[in-house]
Image: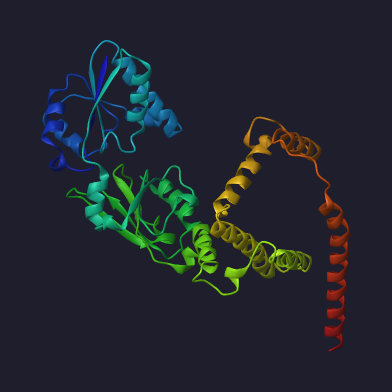
Amino acid sequence: MKVTILGLGSSDVDQMSLRIYRALKNAAHLYLRTSDHPAVQMLDDEGISYETFDHVYEENDTFTDTYQTIVDLLIEAAQDKDITYAVPGSPLLYETTTELLLHHAEENDDFEVEVLGGQSFIDVCIEAVKIPVNDGFQILDGSNLSAADFNHHQHTLITQVYDLFSVSNVKLELLEFYPHDTIVYLIDKAGSKDATLIKAELSEIDHNVPTSNLMTMYVPKVESKALDNRSIHYMNDLFNTLVSEDGCPWDKVQTHESLERFLIEETYEVIEAIETEDDELLIEELGDILLQVGLHAAIAHKDGYFDFYDILSRLNEKLVHRHPHVFGDIEAEETSDVNKIWNAQKEKEGKTERVKYEKEYADKILAWMKETIHEKRSLSEILEGEQ
């Protein structure tokens, strides 16, 4: 049993290699993932027979099911004959069916997969928008995006945009990170005589969207202090600079011990912002708490003990481990269930019991702080009323 996977390339047959053309011409049993590709007209013109899986897209609700169904049908077809399977672009670039077929071949010795590459969309997209690749660029899957994927210091190509719905979903994810007026592009049928380039602000990129399996979104690299300021890596670099020998005279001489009082002071100010229901102040004061964490991390990094990413790693590990009812298969219906799970997970971590002085401190001091804050606010309101 053998499946030969061909790449039809990213656009017209003019971009197709002679090797792929000959393989298509000589294919005894040819299957196409989709007939929505410029090369299909050439197959029709030359009388090359083929079957497509376009109907599978209509019969399934998700791409996961669609691709798995196509692969199942190909495996079944290859039971008694060698077959040729053609896909848009390159078989090895963002082609899930190729991945599934290769995986099946790894687990079945009697099943063979040969891959003959076609031109990928990357080459023609780079040419269409003149991406200077030496500046660095990344490729993202538009069907599985999150703000954590984005890097405004790199040019970005986003695949799996093919209609209004998919482009709108990608736009919403991008707006979680990029400003609404960021200039972005839709590149359709790049490299062909029908190539189209749609340029718009991010907030309006889904106002004029063709339906096409040959479309890619391009987000250019941007230099932006506003975006830098949203980066935890940039923040970490700032603190490391502050405590360096060439940094701030005050910051570079601080120690963990010298910063103790500031953590208490900043914590008080956070509580004051909460109690006075001042959101803008709360943003600032929570930032000051993070400032303390950043300084402690930078000091430890300079001394070679640990760094900010060690803190993040320990925190994330703890969050996942102590929430198996969220990230695992344990169930918790009430707060009391959560408390039991939390304590059980702590025991598994080998935590040694210690006297919790901070518990008593919090009970007594927090009550005093709340009372003091509200008394101060009441007095201020009275004085304002008298004026």
- x then y, percent, for residue 78: 28, 15
Res 300 quadrant in image:
bottom right
- x then y, percent, for residue 291: 62, 64
Question: Would residue 348 appear left or right of 73 to someone viewing this image?
Answer: right
Please identify the quadrant where the N terminus is shown. Answer: top left
Camera-nearest residue between 79 and 372 = 372
Q: Is residue 67 above or below residue 171?
A: above
- Residue at the location (22% across, 54% down)? 127
- x then y, percent, for residue 155: 34, 56
Is residue 213 visible in the rendered image? The answer is yes
Question: Would residue 327 appear left or right of 234 to someone viewing this image?
Answer: right
- Residue at the location (21% across, 25% down)? 50
Is residue 60 visible in the rendered image? The answer is no
Camera-nearest residue between 268 and 84 = 268
Res 267 quadrant in image:
bottom right
Q: Is residue 149 above or below residue 336?
A: below
Farthest residue in the top direction?
80
Count of numbered badges drawn on the protein:
0
Please identify the quadrant where the C terminus is shown. Answer: bottom right
- Residue at the location (31% across, 42% down)? 213
- Residue at the location (63% across, 67% down)? 254
Question: Would residue 239 appear left or right of 54 to someone viewing this image?
Answer: right
- x then y, percent, for residue 120: 25, 42
Q: Is residue 142 above or below residue 267?
A: above
Camera-nearest residue between 236 and 253 = 253
